[in-house]
């Protein structure tokens, strides 16, 4: 009987989280557009308040289940949920007021310091866990640059970390991650390509912090080497994305804080995959890595399995580094790009606009008609000026010369770039 009661409670909780997130995300889209809380890095404005729906539904459903005694969280899961909610509020402030990354990293580190169990990990391993949680939480934010990637990877990782917590008989974190997975699934109904709403810093930081914090709680008490391997396997995709972005910007001489289309999904699109195909590939990679992490946590495979995951991630990063993402954009018909030319003076830098001609050796009809009209007028009323000069003067307008000036139209004109 208690088993059936637990299954029924879990089913009701998951269904409520899924439906509430789907409805709330749809309702928050219009206010986000009205308040201009949108992603300005995309070609079309995408609202960023989808993470608010995920945070609110996860927190409210988990808190209501704990208060009602249906799914008690416990003290550890309660602290984790409170700290993740604070991190989500900090991410919402970043979406609205564009906070700097260092403030987000510092706030996430302070919240992680309040969650890590130092009694089981020790001071040194606990400090390393705080840094790992802060960095991987920031890496989850980078997955939100493409439609559907952050939600898909988040759902897969939530199930994997929840399985690890269930093996350790941590019912509170396991139920909390189950609620998060259902909320992200409801959010994906609106985030699949073409996305109508995005997680933003609020939802991505909340998701990353909740996943990494629960993973640290599940691996507390194990050895540091094996624990690090399992943690990296559970979060292989966001870690690989962060490493790829940092290496590519460093090698290209770009500032690390400067955004660009250099994430995993962007490079897969450059290789010819569709937006949906890139999400499927990254979701499949996350699933394989998470399965290896869960098997390593339960002892079904040895610790060297995490090395295979790390090797595969490193090979993928090195292969995608060869994809060119910082080159000049393609020239559209009639469009121009800025290209450097020979400097006009010492220390000066001039720019010219290079345009692709629509049709070679073709003049507009209006210019030709005006030129012919100028030739006819010059042949009727002008004296002492050749017809060819009048024709050139009609095409290339110059100051009209008086009768006492010597007109030199045939001389080449020099244009100095200043």
Image: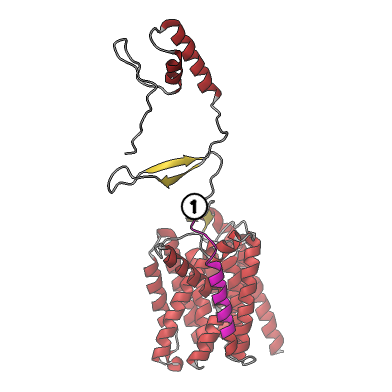
Q: How many marks?
A: 1
Residue 122, compared with residue 115, is above or below; it is below
Which of 32/386 is in front? 386
Q: Position of residue 76 (x, y in %)?
A: 49, 86
Q: Which image quarter is the C terminus in?
A: top left
Quarter of the rendering containing residue 303: bottom right
Residue at far left of view? 346
Question: x and y percent of residue 262 in the render?
Answer: 51, 62
- Vertical placement of residue 128 versus 407, above or below: below
Relative height, residue 368 to residue 194 (above, below): above
Magenta-drawn stretch, dominant element (helix, strand or loop):
helix
Residue at the (66%, 72%) spot, across then down: 15
Q: Nearer the viewer, residue 72 or 252?
A: 252
Residue shown at the point (40%, 69%) measured from the top left: 104
Left-right relation of 405 to 378 = left
**Label 1: element kind:** loop
Picture quarter containing residue 416? top left
Q: Which residues are magenta?
A: 307-327
Left or right: 239 as drawn, with respect to 410: right
Q: Is residue 198 magenta?
A: no
Q: Which residue is mark 1?
A: 328
């Amino acid at each position: 009987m208690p088993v059936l009661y637990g299954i029924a409670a879990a089913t009701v909780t998951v269904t409520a989280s899924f439906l509430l997130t789907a409805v709330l995300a749809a309702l928050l889209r219009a206010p986000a557009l009205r308040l201009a809380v949108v992603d300005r890095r995309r070609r079309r404005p995408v609202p960023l308040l989808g993470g608010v729906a995920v945070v609110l539904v996860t927190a409210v459903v988990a808190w209501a289940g704990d208060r009602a005694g249906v799914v008690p969280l416990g003290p550890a899961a309660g602290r984790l949920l409170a700290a993740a909610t604070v991190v989500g509020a900090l991410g919402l402030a970043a979406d609205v007021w564009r906070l700097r990354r260092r403030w987000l990293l510092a706030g996430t580190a302070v919240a992680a310091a309040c969650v890590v169990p130092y009694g089981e990990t020790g001071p040194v391993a606990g400090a390393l866990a705080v840094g790992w949680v802060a960095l991987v939480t920031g890496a989850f934010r980078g997955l939100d640059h493409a439609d559907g990637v952050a939600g898909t990877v988040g759902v897969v990782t939530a199930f994997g970390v929840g399985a690890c917590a269930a093996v350790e008989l941590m019912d509170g974190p396991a139920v909390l991650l189950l609620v998060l997975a259902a909320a992200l699934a409801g959010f994906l109904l609106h985030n699949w390509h073409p996305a109508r709403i995005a997680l933003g810093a609020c939802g991505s930081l909340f998701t990353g912090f909740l996943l990494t914090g629960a993973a640290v709680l599940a691996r507390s008490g194990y050895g540091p080497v094996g624990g690090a391997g399992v943690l990296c396997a559970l979060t292989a995709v966001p870690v690989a994305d962060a490493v790829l972005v940092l290496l590519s910007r460093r090698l290209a001489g770009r500032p690390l804080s400067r955004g660009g289309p250099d994430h995993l999904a962007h490079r897969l699109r450059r290789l010819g995959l569709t937006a949906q195909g890139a999400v499927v590939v990254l979701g499949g990679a996350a699933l394989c890595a998470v399965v290896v992490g869960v098997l390593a946590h339960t002892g079904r495979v040895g610790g060297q399995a995490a090395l295979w995951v790390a090797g595969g991630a490193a090979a993928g990063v090195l292969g995608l580094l060869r994809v060119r993402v910082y080159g000049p954009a393609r020239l559209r018909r009639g469009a121009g790009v800025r290209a450097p030319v020979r400097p006009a003076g010492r220390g000066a830098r001039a720019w010219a606009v290079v345009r692709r001609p629509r049709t070679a050796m073709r003049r507009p009809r209006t210019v030709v008609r005006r030129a012919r009209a100028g030739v006819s007028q010059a042949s009727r009323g002008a004296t002492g000026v050749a017809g060819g000069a009048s024709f050139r003067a009609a095409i290339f307008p110059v100051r009209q010369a008086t009768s006492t000036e010597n007109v030199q139209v045939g001389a080449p004109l020099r244009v100095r770039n200043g």
